Amino acid sequence: MRMSFGQSMQMAQKQVLAPRMIQSMEILQLPILALQERIEQELQDNPCLEQVEPEVEDAHEPEHVERDDGESELVVKEDSNNEDDFERLVNMADNLPDDYEERSRPSQGQMDADADRAFDQMANMTARAETLCDYLQHQLSWFDLEESLRRMAERIIYSLDTNGYLKSPLEELLPATPPDLNGSAETYRKAQVELAEKALTVVQHLDPPGVGARSLKECLLLQLPPGHPFEPEMRVLIENHLEDLQNNRLPQISKKTGLSLDDIGEVWEEIRLLKPKPGAEFAESNVPSVRPDVFLEKDEAGKYVVRLEEGDLPSLYVSPYYRKLLKQAADADDETREYIKRKINSAQWLIEAIEQRRSTLSRVSQAIVDHQTKFLDEGPEAIEPLKMQQIADRVHVHVTTVSRAVDDKWIQTPRGIFPLKRFFVGGTQNADGDDVAWDVVRIKLQEIVDKENKSKPLSDDALVKELAKEGIEVARRTVTKYRKAMDIPSSRQRKDWAAEKK
């Protein structure tokens, strides 16, 4: 291999994304709530960007700014310094009244109204939900415990996972041996272990039942109700046959315990009422708020037409005040003038990116709706296979643009709210050569399983044959994959042994 230092020339092609294009893609990908936050942030960061007040929103321009009939839209070009546009902005500043800056300040009434809205938002904020630790600590305060026992119980409580289980060994929760200990360290350690076991017993007697367990078996045993008519049988099945129950091996349990299949089935139903995750109800469920970006309506001809939700998006414009300031900065240093140009550029790019988002999302959504009309009219069983490339070809954009347009966007339809990605599904062909969406295959599979004879449940091979009778040709591995994804147990686990005996 030859190595040397020197200069050489070489030609190459590469694609470079301009900042304006990057911003446009970012804006397109934002859902409506995130777009609102982005606009609010830009309004704070960019003094050249302003919003039209609600009372003059129809005018699309402040009432106190006179607009020339010959005024054209500001266009920011990537390959020039836009000198002509900025000179035009300088000339526009002559139209501003002398008291424009003073009149642009918010009135005292407007500031009071903003303060009232902020106070209402704070007053209506959801309070922090009570956690499992809070609930257990509150109960612990009811008991008259020694301080050392209380501290150890608190350690255990704060070591529980979100489901209420103690996954850490008790030895890991013990305090360190003090260096100035008087006596044997082994004796001290043994006393601490006994204290931890006693504290664990205290925690396990708190509500909800089963909290503080170290395994599923212990959790279920802690929940056994005293005096229950099936309590002895439930204890035997939980302690010795829990895995057999999970795999529906009831005949083996009957052979080992002497219980009939009917009795085992009845006891198994009682065990199902116990909670395997006692602390789950206290887990914080941060459900993200869903707000549709697109609404679906029918026109007079009965055709579905999309409408974008932009009622809360402010109308933006480049600040006339900074247009005036740009004229005053004509003789100023280059740094000041360049700063104003850069901010005006940023403001105009944002306005155009939002308009481009509106156009792209509207066209993509309408193309999706036009393809999935049967789904909207007849339901999920009528959904048709659809790929993003098909929509990209229809609206004449790149497939990545379609992906960004539908990402994290929701649509309000007569059948409910759906993510736009919900309408993109793969598929196969039926016996007649027609396309069938995988969602339809899953629906048919669930219907067949629901109608099967539970004493003789269908194997995966049998399910393949039943789907073939419906005109759907799929492989066995496909049926197995979908069955597991839909949480449908195997044929052995679905078998009703008591029904077979009858």
Image (cartoon, rainbow, N blue to C red):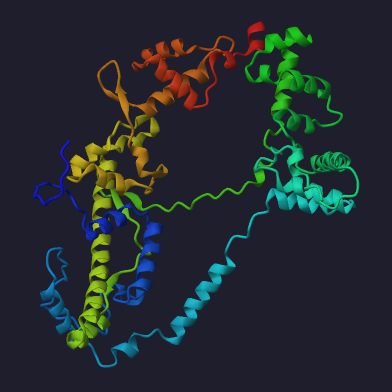
Kindly give the residue lying farthest to the bottom in the view shown. 98
Taking depth in this image into account, of 390 and 171 the one nearest to the observer is 171
Left or right, 197 with reference to 500: right
Which quarter of the figure is the N terminus placed in? Answer: top left
Depicted 396 relative to depicted 18: above or below: above
How many numbered marks are there?
0
Q: Residue at 36% of width from left, 53% of height from top? A: 293
Quadrant of the rendered image containing residue 433: top left
Q: Is residue 361 visible?
A: yes
Quadrant location of residue 351? Answer: bottom left
Image spot of residue 290 (x, y percent): 45, 51
Decide: is 109 above or below 460: below
Q: Position of residue 359 (x, y in %)?
A: 23, 55
- Going 65% across and 11% down the picture, which residue do you hit? 497
Quadrant of residue 191 in the image?
A: top right
Task: Provide residue 158's location: percent of width, then percent of height.
Answer: 71, 48
Q: Nearer the viewer, residue 14 or 470?
A: 14
Whether residue 95 is visible to the viewer of this picture, yes or no, is no
Q: Is residue 102 above or below residue 279?
A: below
Tell me residue 143's x, y (percent): 87, 51
Residue drawn where x is 59% and y is 60% of the image: 126
Left or right of 393 on screen, residue 31: right
Residues 92 and 116: in front is 92
> Could you tell me which quadrant the C terminus lies in?
top right
Q: Is residue 169 above or below residue 98?
A: above
